[in-house]
Image (spheres, rainbow, N blue to C red):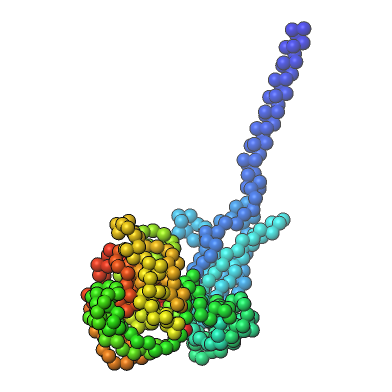
Amino acid sequence: MKHIFKYCLAVSLLVTAMLVNHSCNKVDASDEYGDFLQPDRIGLLNTSVNLNVQGEGAQNIIAITGPHSGWTVTSSESWLTVEKGTTSENGKEEPVVKLSAATNTGYSRKATVTIKLEGTEKEVTKTFTVTQASALPEPAVSLPATTLNFTATAENKTVTLTTNQTEWTATSDATWFTISKNGKDLIIAVTANTGNAPREAVVNIVAGVAPNTAKATLRVVQAKADDINNITVSGIELVRVEAGTFKMGAQNTDATAANYGVIATGSGYAANQGPIHNVTLSEFYIGKYLITQAQWVDVMGTNPSKNIGNNNPVEYVNWTMAADFVAKLSLKTGKTFRLPTEAEWEYAARGGKNSNGYVFSGGNASAVVANFVANTADRDNSRTTPGGTFLPNELGIYDMSGNLYQWCSDYFAAYTADDQVNPTGPATGTNKVMRGGSWWHLQTTVYYRGNNTVTYTGTHANAGLTGLRVVYVP
């Protein structure tokens, strides 16, 4: 039995040795003919190559592996010349594709270069792109804003394109407005919207001649019919104030209190608030609420407020910040926003044509229309409140006698008795007008002007007592 075991073991070892020897021979053969076992491949240093306008020479290094080293190169475009060559820039001789072109007198152009191995059973190719620089400026077009808003009434508006092209087109599938051109002005004329839903469409703008063009889109939005007195632009609700004439300033029998215009007996009025004079204003839209912190952040990116709340009015806003906001809001929406003039502010606070002659904006009982210090037992713990917390005035406008003081566009100047039409205040000055009231102060009347020493960055702004509301003129 032992002998049989030894014999089997010997045979097993012999067979194993033979298999090992055969395997080694196979490895040796593979080493000897390794080139034939490697697949045919083409490698590229770059997948894209750029040529200057003059078409001066460029090249692309290639690498070929496998048994077939022969190759050809072709160009998809006649303007690009391709040749085979070699280079030694990496310390060893390597194949390259040499590239050249005639001077380009037009726009940038592209070609595809194809490298193909010769003698392979299966086709082995590699491509790369060559771009020659443009001799002309690339077509460009831009708009001052991406959205154009309309009220429900029939109206037309003009948008001026910025483009380096003389040829441009503007098209839309919409049937409720027409498009016309005048130089680089795009004119959109909408029909009246009599439906119960807003309308929206897109205008496609193409500048240049195909295939060298630039594109832009303009969103056109029209309010629904019942929104003629209330429109919303970029989340900001606006109230229509009809054109009209009103008596601006304090009445003789209104007040004797010099600072806040609160009701008192007597026949005098605060020095800053008279004399009464007639003011005629054109139609405008004014913010239904003070600008909220969410609306401010949407435009400016940061929030200066300390009493944080998305629906609370933005605070700690000086005049310069307010002016910057309306400028950026205009750019963002394509509307013309600005701060109200002092006359517009007072006319809106009084209720415009719907005025009932209230002392405070919205009523004679200040406690129901205004957030002011007397509405809280503890001044130190009182703060701003979200718009809509108190009752609105006759036009549906909130917080014009409290919550936060509001910046006007005017420089401060003493009133005169002269009649005025759309007054904007003096051309120069040091101090800006601040109207309304604040959560920290007493209630304020519709004619209260504020201190005449409020500077652009005055203490009221630093104390978190000032905000803003905006005006939009269609």
For residue 141, above or below residue 45: below
In the image, what residue occupies the spot 71% across and 21% down? 14
Nearest the eye: 205 or 186: 186
Residue sitting nearer the eye, 275 or 169: 275
Q: Is residue 127 visible?
A: yes
Picture quadrant where residue 370 is located: bottom left
Residue 263, percent across and down? 30, 74
Q: Residue at x 56, y 73 (%)?
A: 110
Q: In the rendered image, which quarter is residue 177 located in?
A: bottom right
Q: Which residue is at the far bottom? A: 419
**Residue 97: image location, x then y, percent:** 55, 65
The x, y position of residue 80, in whole percent, is 56, 74
Q: Residue at x 63, y 80 (%)?
A: 195
Q: Nearer the viewer, residue 445 or 468?
A: 445
Q: How many marks?
A: 0
Answer whether residue 451 is visible to the viewer in this image. Answer: no
In the rendered image of this protein, does residue 128 appear above or below residue 349? Answer: above
